[in-house]
Amino acid sequence: MKTTRGSIAFLGLLVGATVLAAGTTSVSASFGKDGFLQVDKNCSAYQGQPGQFCTITSANISEITPGTKVIYTQPADIPAGVLDSNVLLDAGDGNRATGRCTLDMATGLGLCRFSDGTGRFAGFHARVDVTPPQYAGDDWHWRGTYAFTRKNVAAHPGGKK
């Protein structure tokens, strides 16, 4: 009998540990990840108006997937010759990062910075240089650095905030 009770107790502990481990899987696998960021985006749908966007065509990190939108919330050309806008990197399903982009419209050169996000972008920080297309059919380019600096806890313990 003791062997059976011991086996049952061990099995109960094993099941309990598995359930607890499953409850902690909401922590982002991206936490602590950092490095060089390379993103290309198509801006054929962007005409300088608030709410318009560019679409990511490729990126070297898995969190930024093709089809992710870069939505500009402020109009271009204010001040004249400059795009200076808050931006939302929106991958859908609550996966968003907030930032700001400033671009010289005459040269197409600029800078974007991202300071945090939600979902898979929780803790996302980036600083990228912007360069324009070099030939017809080319995309705009972001090159710089990124880091994920905090854990993403998708579900609050206890189910509600």
Image (cartoon, grey):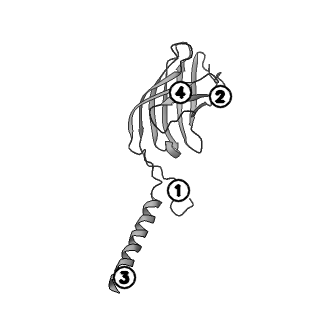
Q: Are the residues at dot 2 and dot 3 in contact (C-beta closer than 8 Å)?
A: no
Q: Quadrant of residue 86?
A: top right
Quadrant housing the N terminus: bottom left
Quadrant housing the C terminus: bottom right
Residue indicated by mark 4: 101
In the image, which is nearer the foreground, mark 2 or mark 3?
A: 3
Residue indicated by mark 2: 52
Residue depicted at 46% across the width and 60% down the height: 22
Q: CA distance from mark 4 to mark 3?
A: 65 Å
**In the image, residue 96 lies at what x, y percent?**
55, 40
- 9 shown above or below 61: below
In the image, which is nearer the foreground, mark 4 or mark 2?
A: 2
Q: Are the residues at dot 4 and dot 2 in contact (C-beta closer than 8 Å)?
A: no
Q: Which amino acid lies under the numbered mark 4 shown in the image of this protein?
A: Cys
Q: Which amino acid lies under the numbered mark 1 shown in the image of this protein?
A: Ala
Mark sitting on residue 4: 3
18 and 105: which is toward the camera: 18
Q: CA distance from mark 4 to mark 1?
A: 31 Å
Q: Which amino acid lies under the numbered mark 2 shown in the image of this protein?
A: Gln
